[in-house]
Image (cartoon, rainbow, N blue to C red):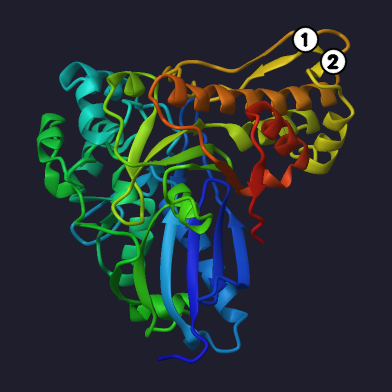
Amino acid sequence: MTSNPLLVGVDVGTTSIKAIIAGPDGRTVVVASRPTPTHYPRPGRAHFLVSELWDRFVAVLREVTGRLDDPRRIVSVAVTSFAETGMPIDAHGQAATDEAIAWFDTRTIPQAAWLDRTIGRDVLFARSGLSLQPIFTLNKLLWIKENQPEVWRRTVRWLNTADYFAFRLSGVQATDYSLASRTLALDLHQLRWDDEIIRAAGLDPGLFAPLVSGGVRLGPILAAVARETGLPESAVVASGGHDHVCGAVAAGVIAPGSLLNSLGTAEALFLPVHRPLTDPLAGRQGYTQGAHVVGGRRYVFSGQYTSGASVDWLRSVLGGVGHPLSHRELIAEAAAVPVGSLGVTFLPHLRMANPPYDDPRSRGAFVGLSSDVTRGTLARAVFEGLALETRGSYEPLLSDHGIAPADRVIAIGGGTGNELAMRIKASVMRRPHTVIEVE
């Protein structure tokens, strides 16, 4: 056994790719991050380049391993990521295309409509626990099949983002249950691939990798990757999972009675439940469910697609091209505006509606503008609008679906650094928020 062992976690997120080295007690030793490059070729379209993601992934690993006195202390590595982006893989284990459709891309609205006509949204919700939204994997696979026949011809496997990086590290293809939960292809009740649904969508069940629990040993670091990243060949790669779900474990949100508010580019409301919701109304409202990474538990998922993204968008618009307004300036100006934002209201639907309004074509708005409106007014309206949207997404789970109110709210993620926004959120939600600070 290695003395003073260390663990490595890498998160491939929408905003950044971050690597953390920590001890078994969870204390952080080294952190490094790089921005996640995202490409927007036209409205409604967004993609990542697999090669760019891998380069950034390697860069953060080289940085953190290079800052250790002895990288051989590293005993294990795991990867988490956003959930609805994946990579088609060819028979040689290579990405069949360098373009990975971004999780929030809406080009797949026609494919979602086809699945509704062919299988039915209520059937999909009953089996997978997911509302029929265009972001989920089956829609992306159908889009590739219909629009990129050469890529489709080469594709033999689909790997979610964290799965792909674990595969590059270890040579083992596997998918954990939390990421599989965001595909529309997992039977949430039996925790197995739903071959009937997959075939009904015109796809081959063999596209999907073997299922494993989070934290399962996959294999040792490949020699070539060890040389590239600085990781020791003796380190073991373990399965990771969906970033928000893994964040819930770190925050101690495992059993019913707790609510995790994970604040990043998107915002997740994560509620552990004893058993999945079965009322089709929940699916029609846009709520989703999945498998926790702990002990066979399930969860209900809500939130917003453009929480932190709304703030970054406003910073960019107010600051000008290439010179976004700083977070500090934005918050200071918003703090000078009274509660209510002088009657200005912000609807945070910059990409699509949030639950309980399942409408991928909905778009955002400022309402109540006048000549008295300042940058600070708009900023406070965004903070208040996001908080009201969070409450509006949470309360129907209680009133319509019988979920008991959470005894505690745990907040994590980059958005928690905005103290003004957190105070507004706690006031609007009528619940104190415990913020877990992470370096």
Name which residue lies at 81% across and 36% down.
Answer: 331
Does residue 338 lie above or below 36 as drawn? above
| Residue 10 pos. (x, y %) | 49, 63
- Tag 1: residue type? Leu
- Tag 2: residue type? Val
Report the disc number at residue 282.
none
Mark 2, other Cα within 10 Å: few <14 / some 14–19 / many ≥20: some
Instruction: From the viewer's side, name the closer residue of 436 and 155.
Output: 436
Per the image, label 1 sits on a secondary structure element best described as: loop
Does residue 316 lie above or below 64 as drawn? above
Would residue 192 appear left or right of 94 to someone viewing this image? left
Per the image, label 2 sits on a secondary structure element best described as: loop
Name which residue lies at 74% across and 39% down.
Answer: 322
Name which residue lies at 21% across and 51% down.
Answer: 157
Does residue 217 lie above or below 247 as drawn? below
User: Is residue 87 in view from this perspective?
Assistant: no
User: Which corner quadrant of the image does residue 306 belong to?
Assistant: top right
| Residue 302 pos. (x, y %) | 46, 32
| Residue 246 pos. (x, y %) | 45, 54
- Please identify the quadrant where the N terminus is shown: bottom left
Q: Do callouts 1 and 2 mark residues in contact (Cβ within 8 Å)?
A: yes
Residue where numbered disc 2 is placed: 373
Instruction: From the viewer's side, name the closer residue of 255 and 128.
Output: 255
Does residue 156 lie above or below 344 as drawn? below
Would residue 365 appear left or right of 301 to someone viewing this image? right
User: Is residue 115 in view from this perspective?
Assistant: yes
Would residue 296 appear left or right of 367 to someone viewing this image? left
Residue where numbered disc 1 is placed: 369
User: How far separated are the C-alphas under marks 1 and 2?
Assistant: 6 Å
Name which residue lies at 48% across and 75% down.
Answer: 7
